[in-house]
Image (cartoon, rainbow, N blue to C red):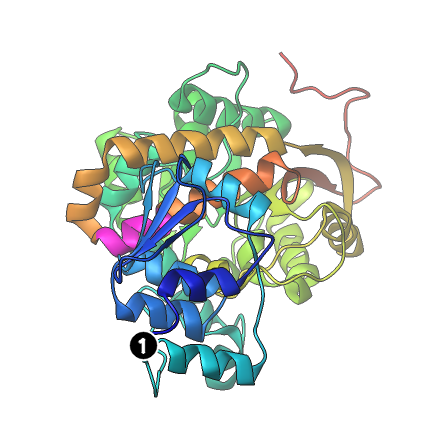
Amino acid sequence: MSTTIADAFATLMRGGMPVRFTAYDGSETGPAGAAIGLHLHNERGLAYLLTAPGDLGMARAYVMGDLDLSGVHPGDPYDALLLLKDNVRFRMPPPAEALALVRDLGLGRLRPPPPPPQEHLPRWRRAVEGVRHSMARDAEVIAHHYDVSNRFYELVLGPSMAYTCAVFEEPDATLEEAQAAKFDLICRKLALEPGQRLLDVGCGWGGMVRHAAREHGVQSLGVTLSLQQAEWAKAAIDREGLGDLAEVRHLDYRDVVEGGFDAVSSIGLTEHIGVRNHAAYFAHLRDRLKPGGRLLNHCITRPHNRRQETGAFIDRYVFPDGELIGSGSVIRAAQDAGLEVQHTENLRQHYALTLAQWCHNLEVGWDECVAEVGESTARVWGLYMAGSRIGFERGEIELHHVLATRAEETGPAAFPLRPDWTP
């Protein structure tokens, strides 16, 4: 073999190798004393790297266990991703060079291996097979992400089962304290009082529904497209004795026909509905509110308002059909739907802290998580959460609260001169 695997790997890089790379043929490259190492176990992993150069090929090999990281735990590969993100740049070799490289490695007729079973169809394939953001397709992609295993989510998210950005009133607050603070902040922004009615769309495992009912005496209805979430939430409501105040339904938010709610909360749903559907989404939520009612929209945003793809890994492994846009576009859609935006707040730093806690939980509970969902799926989650943490830390993605009101029949809704949710 005239070309070693380490040589081949190095040719796909721009600017050198910041980690120690070793391969099953005994070849090596990169600094000998590097704290982070990559080891390629087999020919299938090499085929992933060569047939999908860049992040997707590495992700496929890593998820399948063909490529391993040393120096970090798979539940929290944050340090490795930080190093790779700052120092690794892939290049796509010209076809003739790529063919010569494959021949030198003795792989002759190299074919792409089947993608890992955790990988969803690419966006263009899904576009052929179904209408994007139809109710049926949304249900399918939500199941892909959320119907993994309730026990797995319990291990990663902790007792709150809140899979959205927490609010850390102190940097050293526990995850449970921060999730409770998040729900209570939203309740205060919505000015919830006993006897009022709340609709929580995309309610997940019912954290907001139960908090509003338990802590504020509010009649709360939550809806989710995930059957596993709905079943877990219903059991939690019964376990906490909240059945007279709280309800969760397995339902698309577009199928909610009741109106007259004092408040609507949407915590982590907007990312799933599609930017083109924002106007219809806000109009539907506006119509669920009584005159003068409040809406709190909590969603991941971009630091700009230009169209930007989520990237192959996130789209295929984590949030199929997910779309992000800047808070300006979210506010514009709310305003165009006839809502008056009263306040907006960026909680970007809080999401970085939240993700660090989730990664810690995954690392601590690794063995049980792997037993529950398999190592490949657990690796997907470690990769996704650690990578997202970096994105929030660097301002590449943000998290915005947008608080809006529906007008009274006689004019704008009453609203305090200063925010009424501060302690």
Residue type at mark 1: give it. Pro
Q: Residue 210 in the image: state x and y as whole percent.
A: 38, 32
In this view, the residue farthest toward the front is: 2
Q: In which quarter of the image is the C terminus?
A: top right
Q: Which of the pair 76/57 is nearer the observer?
A: 57
Name the residue: 44% across, 31% down.
356
Left or right placement of residue 392 versus residue 149 in this view: right
Look at the numbered disc 1 and give the secondary structure of its residue.
loop
Residue 378 among magenta residues: yes
Q: Up-down: is 23 above or below 417?
A: below
Name the residue: 35% across, 83% down.
111
Left or right placement of residue 328 versus residue 133 in this view: right
Q: Mark 1 points at which residue?
A: 113
Label 1: few (<14), some (14–19) or many (≥20) C-alpha neighbours in 10 Å? some
* Residue interval drawn in magenta: 375-381
Name the residue: 32% across, 64% down.
118
In this view, the residue farthest toward the right is: 411
Q: Up-down: is 273 above or below 370?
A: below
Quadrant of residue 36 within the rendered picture: top left
Q: Residue 15 in the image: state x and y as whole percent.
A: 60, 53
Name the residue: 29% across, 49% down.
378
Q: Which of the pair 415/231 is nearer the observer?
A: 231
Q: Up-down: is 222 above or below 140?
A: above
Q: Is the magenta stretch mostly helix, strand or loop?
A: helix
In this view, the residue farthest toward the bottom is: 109
Q: Residue 352 in the image: state x and y as whole percent.
A: 53, 33
Note whether residue 262 is visible. Answer: no
Q: Quadrant of the N terminus?
A: bottom left
Residue 237 among magenta residues: no
